Image (cartoon, rainbow, N blue to C red):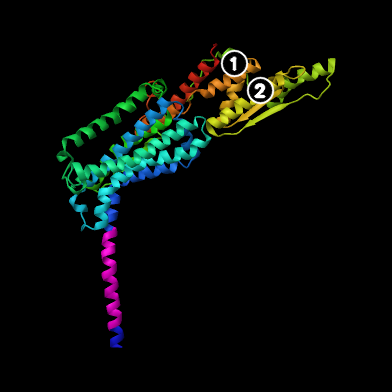
Amino acid sequence: MFRWWQWVDYRVRRAGEWLLPRLANLRSVWRVLHRVRFAWLLTAVACGALFLAQGQEILASSFVTLADALVFVAACTLAAASIWYCSRTLIRLMPPSSALPSTPAADALRRHLPRVLGALVLLLPGTALAFLSRTMPNRSLALFSAIVLINLAVAFYVALQLRRRVVLKGIDPADEHVPSVAQLSAPTRYFLFVMLCLNVLVPALLMIWPMLPLHLHIAGGTITMVALALVVVVGSLLVHFSDLSGLPLLVLLLIAAALLSRCSVHHGVTTLPIDESRAPAPMALESYLARRIDPRLARCSTSGCAQPIPVVIVAAEGGGVRAAAWTALVLARIESRLAQSTPPQRLNDSLVGISGVSGGSLGAALFVASSDQSAEQINIIAKKFFAHDLLTPSLAGLLFVDPLVALSPYPIPAAAIADRGLTFERNLESAWLAASAED
């Protein structure tokens, strides 16, 4: 019995000797990952967005011209540099209370994780673009941009590695502990100051001029990368002060935004002034159908009808801009086919109702608004309308303006700030005016 107990005690001690160093290693690795959690979570969210149809649409719309592609690559480079620099700075600012015994895995992670995160910001869109290029109209430009981004990702990591070995003589700044933000080097403080100023300036410009991205010919993918470059600075600083104070500042901000967002809805749907005396009175469905169908029945009873009277009801489902374009272009095509029939007909003569949701209702509204034009002109108006960039201004409002509006405890008047909803309305008005204008 004693020998058996000695054998068990020996095995338990050996297992502890094997397990405890590995647990300490895992704790040290987790401490580094926890320190730069905002940067790698942001990168993971961006990676997940590329698997969604909306994310792929944003990426594909950023490569219409060579200038668009160059600006997008520049924005990706800025985002990569920002994520690398902020992650490295956070590791250097790690408070002494977070210090654990150094392990080889944790040391390697401190040196390489910021570079890997920066390189991923270039590699992920480049890889996604390489797969999407087969379905894009400008395939050669997309494939060229994908190759440039992938090569930039490799060059970014190699350049930072060579910088440590050649310029810094093998000394990695991530190994140096800095007690506070005030004791960071002057270039780092200037970088943080400039990026924080841009975090104020860019939302302010978009609040005043929500159509600014269209005037500057900036696509949605570029806006997203600029937002990534700016928000990682604010998020990293919040992580640092959260670790110092022991308060979950990011979680508290999210809770505050969720609670205050109900107070910050500050405008309704924009409407046109209506003369109440000339406004149509509400009509029951039976009365409306009788008004639409009875005159045609009366004409048939007088002059005769060779064919049954068609009654058309359109149901348009949602699906964003794609559903809107599909609805408007299909209705325009039907109108064009009817105009070529013998005798010529109009869809509006047989159309008694349209039921639409989301994007489908937008496409239906576009068709109804242009239904007094010829069949050919309706098709032209629809194509011009959806050639307009309906996404980028709203995306810019979502990324830069709405987070600030959500934190306001008081409703902000629409005259002061154009939020995402009002921006979308103005963009629709701009697209309609451009599409319906005479050449």
- Rendering coords of residue 182 (x, y %): 16, 38
- Rendering coords of residue 189 (x, y %): 19, 35
Residues 149 and 303: in front is 149
Residue 280 left/right relative to 35: right
Which residue of the protein is positioned furthest toward the top in this rendering? 438
Q: Which residue bears the numbered disc 1?
A: 279
- Rendering coords of residue 331 (x, y %): 64, 25
- Rendering coords of residue 3 (x, y %): 29, 87
The amino acid type of the residue labelled 2 equals Met
The amino acid type of the residue labelled 1 equals Ala
Disc 1/disc 2 C-alpha distance (Å)? 12 Å
Residue 136 left/right relative to 30: right
Q: Secondary structure at mark 1?
A: loop
Q: Which residue bears the numbered disc 2?
A: 283
Query: Is the stretch drawn in magenta largely helix, strand or loop?
Result: helix
Q: Residue at 35% across / 40% down in the picture?
A: 153
Q: Is residue 144 magenta?
A: no
> Circle 2: is it few (<14), some (14-19), or many (20+) Cα within 10 Å?
few
Residues 415 and 203: in front is 203
Please report the bounds of the magenta region as a residue range.
Answer: 6-26
Q: Is residue 9 visible?
A: yes
Q: Residue at 34% across / 38% down in the picture?
A: 152
Quarter of the image for the N terminus: give it. bottom left
Q: Is residue 96 above or below residue 203?
A: below
Q: Is residue 89 above or below residue 270?
A: below
Asked where in the image residue 289 lies, by quadrant, the reply is top right
